[in-house]
Image (cartoon, helix red, strand yellow):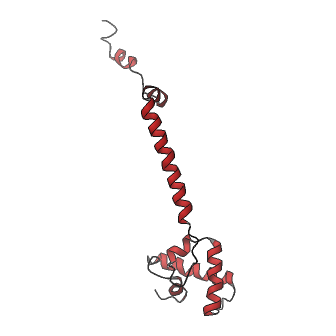
Amino acid sequence: MSTEDRPGAAASSWERPTLRGVMRRHKGASAVAIVVVVLLVAFTVAAAVSSSSTAALSDSTSCTQWVAARPEQQNAYSQLYLKEHGALSSGASGPATVRSAITSACSQAAYLGESDDVSVLAAVRHDF
């Protein structure tokens, strides 16, 4: 019986491909793939940075937008809420307590599956 007739002989002559080996054999395609990956990462990072909007929050801001807003935006809206609407019926009269009340109300709206449709003003008033 020759070595080629044995079942393990054919399997041992085949090498498992490695990333380095594939890249050496296909240099042009590898370079294009690397450029594509770098561009995708760059676009993803740019989209993430630009999506954190600097727009001010308002009464019509949805609970989903409230949760995604930066703490500075939430604090600014809390102060605006107090200025325009006064203290909450729960007695919350400081920006931190208003922010906490809005977050809590929006969490309840999210639990009910309505965070996209409920504004922060409606959430604070429990109109959902």
Q: Is residue 51 visible?
A: yes
Which is more toward the observer, 116 or 49? 49
Q: Position of residue 39 (x, y in %)?
A: 49, 47
Outermost residue, top direction? 1
Q: Is residue 70 above or below residue 60?
A: above
* Residue 20 percent location from the top left of the image: 49, 29
Snapshot quadrant of residue 116 = bottom left
Q: Which residue corresponds to the image point at 51% horizontal and 45% vertical from the top-left?
A: 38
Is 78 on the left or on the right of 31, as rendered? right
Q: Where is residue 103? Give x, y as percent.
A: 58, 78
Q: How many marks?
A: 0
> Residue 92: which quarter of the image?
bottom right
**Would residue 1 appear left or right of 40 to someone viewing this image?**
left
Please name the residue shown 64% across and 93% down the image.
86
Q: Is residue 89 visible?
A: no
Q: Nearer the viewer, residue 127 or 112?
A: 127
The residue at 53%/65% (across/down) is 51
Q: Looking at the picture, does residue 15 appear above or below residue 102?
A: above
Residue for point 57% across, 72% down? 69
Point out the image quarter for the N terminus: top left
